[in-house]
Image (cartoon, rainbow, N blue to C red):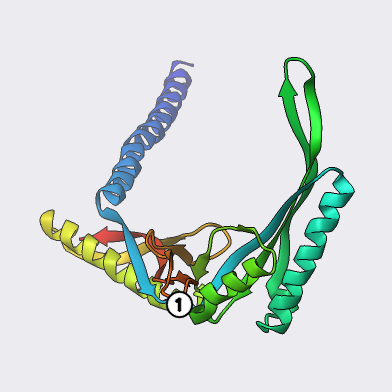
Amino acid sequence: MKAWSKKLGAVMLAGSLMIGGMALGGVIQGPEKAYAAEDVQRNVVSVVGKGELSLKPDVVYLSIGVNATAATAEEAQKTIGAKISKISALLKTTWGIADKDIQSTQFIVQPNYSYTEKEGQQIKGYIAQHSLKVTYRDLNKVGQLLDAASAAGANNIGNTQFAIEDPSALEAQVIEKAMANADAKAGVIAKAAKRSLGQVITVTQSDDGNHPVVYMENATMAKSSADAAGGTYVEPGEVRVSTQLSVMYELK
């Protein structure tokens, strides 16, 4: 009986040692995984590369509109309707602008209120506004077109925006410039850290969610002035096509 008890105790002890060994093994393996993750974090460098091209625009977007006031909403609407029809016909026949390049962007008819302490708030007629977005590609004649629109009745000419009509055609060029910029930055950082640059781990392109390449106007892009003949002169200037890449590299 005593011998059997001793054997049972030995079995139980061996089992405890096995369980303890497994538990100990788990404790040792945990930190090893953590150290591996930390090594990965220590051996990378992340930079943002920027690519940009400055070039002459090939299209201009014009805002040409008419504002009118009248005693009634109907009269105000008829007034701007007649003028907008005249301007549209001019743009299509004289300037050869296609229907697809003329789009109404704003049409408003609303009361014009005035206020006095004696009468309170009163309607003093109506205001009507109608604006067209016009896409035009002969940039040498923009000033002449605006003068012609004004002569036809346009009295609300908004911002003149020059742009690249198809910036996606330049995407490869700006991406290559952005990647080269990222390589240069990462190389300088690696050298300063007395390390060498390894392979690219990840690349992410930053954009507005719609266009992979963003185009923007220069601050001094558009200027208007009166020339010797009294007409309007518009300077297209340059536009900028750009993109950004977030790049992570391995450090050796």
**Amino acid at pointer 1:** Leu
- Front residue of 149/180: it is 149
Residue 210's spot in the image, x, y percent?
A: 58, 62
Q: Which residue is mark 1?
A: 170
The answer to which image quadrant residue 245 occupies is bottom left
Quick one: SS at disc 1?
Answer: helix
Identify whether 244 is placed above or below 167.
above
Residue beneath the point at 78% across and 58% down: 80
Q: Given the current orientation, which residue lies at the most extreme right position?
A: 74
The answer to which image quadrant residue 60 occupies is bottom right
Count of residue discs: 1
Identify whether 119 is placed above or below 85.
above
- Front residue of 136/125: it is 125
Classify residue 82 as left or right of residue 13.
Answer: right
Residue 164's spot in the image, x, y percent?
A: 50, 73
Identify whether 80 is placed above or below 113.
below
- Front residue of 62/204: it is 62
Classify residue 75 as left or right of residue 96.
Answer: right
Q: Is residue 202 visible?
A: no
Residue 234's spot in the image, x, y percent?
A: 46, 70
Residue beneath the point at 18% across and 56% down: 189
Residue beneath the point at 48% across and 67% down: 213
Within 10 Å of disc 1 (Cα), the crowding (few <14, some 14-19, many 20+) is some
Q: Is residue 208 visible?
A: yes
Q: Given the current orientation, which residue lies at the most extreme front position?
A: 229
